[in-house]
Amino acid sequence: MLGRKLIVAAVACLLPVFAQAAGGGYLETVHIQPSNKASLQRGSRTYVNYCIGCHSLNYLRYNRMANDLGLPADIVEENLIFTSDENGEHHKVTDMMHSAMTTEYGKGAFGAAPPDLSLIARSRGVDWLYTYLKTFYVDESRTGTGHNNLAFPDVGMPNVMWELQGLQRPIYTEADDGHGSTHKVFEGFEQVTEGTLSAAEYDKVVRDLVNFLHYAAEPGRAQRISMGIWVMLFLFVFTAGAYVLKKEWWRDVR
């Protein structure tokens, strides 16, 4: 009886998670490599080339990124810092990764200021972020941007990487719901124009970018995990030693 109650309680706790996933609609799965520094370096390059113009990483400094990703500070300063502060001075390697776009300009251009991406991978999840970056499509009804998104319908952001991906359009089929009504079922995308990258190459770019944003959400994750492993090993050795010592001390006690 107790076991059944525990199972029911666990399912009840997970229901909001399932509901959120179901409410999000179409979702792809991505397998990132947080320890792959080459992937993180490529992702950082994509971020500063396509994202930082609108989206900041307000909780990450350039020099912290350089140290964690194995990049020389001078290389970062010369090749990955393109923005300036509100006084027009070029950002330095010791600065946070701020966007050059002001909140007021973002609201005027997009209706809402583009969000900071520091915690986007934690708040949305890497699968959602990966799906979002891959599922922009042509939508003539969107007079502002001409694009829409499968993971985030009616999003105000244009497809900034359309030249890499090319333009695509979703394919839907009609399905019977078994109650006399039909609904649209997403089947895939058809390519409208080719991009500069193949589908496999673009997929790699997106995976690297998601991997970098996953790192940016918690830069100390790798260090914390490494330290945690050593702490667990210490506790294991300490427990084994304490047990042997206890046996020795109590050996003659009846």
Image (cartoon, rainbow, N blue to C red):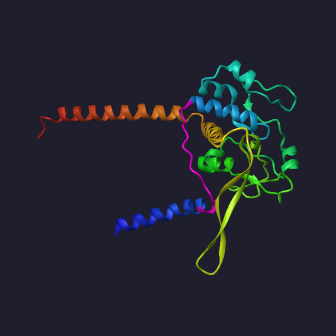
Task: Please count the marks in the image.
Answer: 0
Query: Which residue range is magenta in the image?
Result: 22-36
The correct choice, above or below, for 2 with respect to 45 in the image is below
Residue visible at 83% across and 51% down? 145
Nearest the viewer among 253 and 173 is 173
Nearest the viewer among 172 and 217 is 172
The correct choice, above or below, for 22 with respect to 192 in the image is below
Residue visible at 59% across and 29% down? 38
The correct choice, above or below, for 166 with respect to 140 in the image is above
Magenta segment: does it hold 30?
A: yes
Residue visible at 73% across and 58% down? 153
The quarter in which the N terminus is drawn is bottom left
Instruction: Quadrant for residue 149, please give it.
Output: bottom right
Residue visible at 60% across and 60% down? 20
Nearest the viewer among 243 and 91 is 91
Left of 51 or right of it: where is 207? Answer: left
Where is residue 76 drawn, in percent x and y? 70, 23
Where is residue 8 drawn, in percent x and y? 44, 67
Where is residue 58 drawn, in percent x and y? 72, 37
Extreme residue toward the bottom, this view: 180
Left of 44 or right of it: where is 143? Answer: right
Magenta segment: does it hold 25?
A: yes
Left of 185 or right of it: where is 142? Answer: right
Nearest the viewer among 160 and 234 is 160
The quarter in which the C terminus is drawn is top left
Instruction: Quadrant for residue 210, please give it.
Output: top right
Where is residue 33 drawn, in percent x and y? 54, 37
Magenta-drawn stretch, dominant element (helix, strand or loop): loop
